[in-house]
Amino acid sequence: MTGIGFTNPRPAQFRRLGHVLYAAGLRMQKAMAEYVKDGTRPDQILVLEHNPVFTLGRNATRQDIHVADAFLDQRGVEVFETDRGGQVTYHGPGQVVVYPICNLKGGREDVGRLVRGLEEAMIRCAADFGVKADRLQGFPGVWVDTPRGPEKLGALGIHLNRWITTHGIAFNVAPDLAHFRWITPCGITDKGVCSLASLLGDAAPTWDQAADSLQAHMAATLGLDVLPVPESSRSVSALTWRRAPGGVEILVMLRNPDQGLWWSSVTGMVEPGETPEATAHRELKEETGLTGTLTDMAFSHSFWMDPAILGLPSGPPRFNRETCFHMEVAPGAQVDLARDEHSEYRWCGFQEAHDLMMWEGSKAALRRLRRELEA
């Protein structure tokens, strides 16, 4: 089809990252924009799924969100201001979010072609599963005619800085559509939102099936020469806690300066041939000397590994996927701290632990543990 997307091939790497916390996703985009800016490295296409979050574009205001902060806090929905165009939109589980971090210099200086290519990829993806989607004049994204009128299937918002693109698309596979009723999506009051699941029911594809389709079509419509990527490394975290007279207490440890100098729970890298559960048991024993009942939190997330913070050599981007556990120990259990990694430890309440911890993955796991124990 002429006039849609780019035709001159450019090297690119698709990063299939799974669940990514929104703040970590913003850091990823910034880092990948820096990585591709000199034009000698492949574009980086990040394919992922976010935690529930409302994002405010440059034209949005807090009034576009129709519920109070306390209401959102109770339901685990975050709010972020962003530098993309547009107004307020929603990201959450069940959406395929794609961030094309592209360098458009060198004959590709045409944002309109990028936008048309992204829209066309979503249209073709929908068609793969029997859904007719199309553009709607004056309204970015892709839309479906339904008995209720036009409904948005895929949202689009791009930020451009010196011909480097960030942000991208959110394609609705099976998100919780009720969350869209808490906002004015993209400033539109007279049109709805749909998903493949709302249109197809049990015949809807899985997240991975939709992501596979989107990736293939994006490679074609954006003119990408797809290169292989190394697998992400894997790690674990293990929140360690005990019951005390004043309530639940969480163990946090201060890393030595050469280990990052931040407060954290037990963490460690999965070694070759090791399961995440085995890693968690090993790290708990090595770092704290503690044993107890280990519980899989059914929560994992991916993040970009910043070489400057982690003391890694420079080179191609590194991503890591962390699996989260928690472990209850006896109230009187003694901590045998690994002094080569940590200088001190504390037992503290949920809020203090949350305030001390540096990374959003640790904070998210802690919030999940609190909800589980207080349920």
Image (cartoon, rainbow, N blue to C red):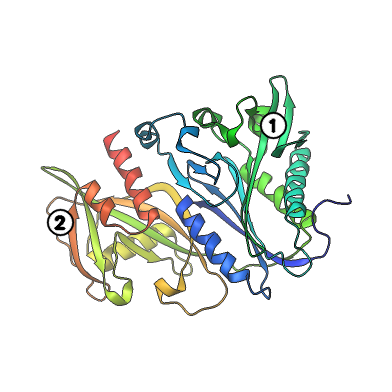
Give how far apart the Cα atoms at labels 2 and 1 are: 51 Å
Residue 169 visible to an observer of this rendering:
yes
Q: Nearer the viewer, residue 155 or 249?
A: 155
Q: Position of residue 348 (x, y in %)?
A: 18, 52
Q: Amino acid at mark 2?
A: Ala
Q: Which residue is mark 2?
A: 333
Q: Which residue is mark 1?
A: 203
Mark 2 or 1: in front is: 1
Where on the picture, by quarter, is residue 251? bottom left
Q: Earlier in the sequence, mark 2 or mark 1?
A: 1
Q: Residue at x 40, y 71 (%)?
A: 309
Q: Is residue 113 above or below residue 235?
A: above
Q: Residue at x 72, y 55 (%)?
A: 111
Left or right: where 196 falls relative to 279: right
Q: Position of residue 106 (x, y in %)?
A: 76, 70
Q: Position of residue 280 (x, y in %)?
A: 35, 60
Q: Secondary structure at mark 1?
A: helix
Q: Nearer the viewer, residue 268 or 123?
A: 123
Q: Amino acid at mark 1?
A: Ala
Q: Secondary structure at mark 2?
A: loop
Residue extending furthest toward the right: 2
Please rate how many residues cluster around mark 2, counting C-alpha atoms within 10 Å: few if below 14, some from 14 to 19, many from 20. Answer: few
Q: Is residue 339 above or below residue 332?
A: below
Q: Position of residue 296 (x, y in %)?
A: 38, 49
